[in-house]
Amino acid sequence: MDTESNKSERGFILISVAIALSIAVIVLTITLSSHFRGVETSREYESIQEMNRLKDAITGTSIENFGFIGDMGRLPNSLSELNTQGTQTAFHTTDGTTPHFGSVGMGWRGPYYKYGKTDDDYLKDAWGRQYVYVITGTVTSGGGITLNQRTAQIISNGPDGAYPSSDDLYAEPIVEKTNLIIRVVKVMSDQTMTNVTIDVFSSNNGEQTQTTAPTITFTGDGGQETSVPIANLHQGVHAFNINFGVMDETGYVYIIGGDANKYKFAVPVGLKK
């Protein structure tokens, strides 16, 4: 027979079970929430690391490795260009039978990104979604000046998979070209020289191109130095030719402005470094 004591005992047990179940649910909820947060944090970290490696593939990582920009002289139009040559000009050091000035090589020599598990794995973030690759800015010309303001950025849509949104992940912007200041040194002659020119040889979409820096003047004394701005130069290996107009004059150049770690000079015959 149910007594008041038995009913009270059963009620207490039911309440205890309910409390225990509630605690278990709370603990499980906290554990799962912590687990999922950990998974999302891990995916965010993995995606950021990969975006930084993609950026390095574009810009290079050292004075001996200038990446895609150093070889092609431009930003990739898409991330797939890092590992797929397609119609891009192959790496070369001659135009036909004519060697490049300073024997500087240029053109595509990928693959530039070498960490992916499959051919196109590097195009996707840790959630398996395609990275967003955005190029902004323009190249404008006027008054004899060309201003290159193009930059690129690699973006992951983040946990929610939407772009743009507040949880998007961004790599550091990549600048296509920058301005450089070099110091030109005249070594030997003591005579005044006007209209001294400097030819700069660099890559334009994988092909050698030549531009001429603003003319400079030296007055007298050998050993003179002067600064010359070089506008819109992509990072990488470049050849410089100084035309003094005097057969026995030599000189050399070195960087005094800009990021010296992003440029390297190939020294042609007759130009002392």
Image: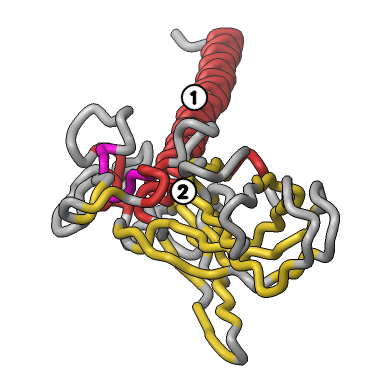
- Residue at 28% x, 50% y is 107
Q: Is residue 2 above or below residue 214?
A: above
Q: Which residue is mark 1?
A: 35
Compared across the picture, whether 12 is left or right of 72 comes to right
Compared across the picture, whether 264 is left or right of 249 comes to left
Chief secondary structure of the magenta span? loop
Q: Which mark is residue 158?
A: 2
Question: Residue extending furthest bottom?
Answer: 143
Q: Is residue 240 magenta?
A: no
Given residues 208 and 59, the one toward you in this image is 208
Q: Amino acid at mark 2?
A: Gly
- Quarter of the image for residue 77 reads bottom left
- Quarter of the image for residue 217 reads bottom right
- Quarter of the image for residue 190 reads bottom right
- Residue at 15% x, 59% y is 87
Of the 4 image quadrants, the one containing the C terminus is top right
Of the 4 image quadrants, the one containing the N terminus is top left
For the question of whether residue 230 can be seen, the reply is: yes
Give the residues drawn in magenta, as a range.
Answer: 104-111
Instruction: Give residue 195's position: percent from left, percent from top.
Output: 66, 74
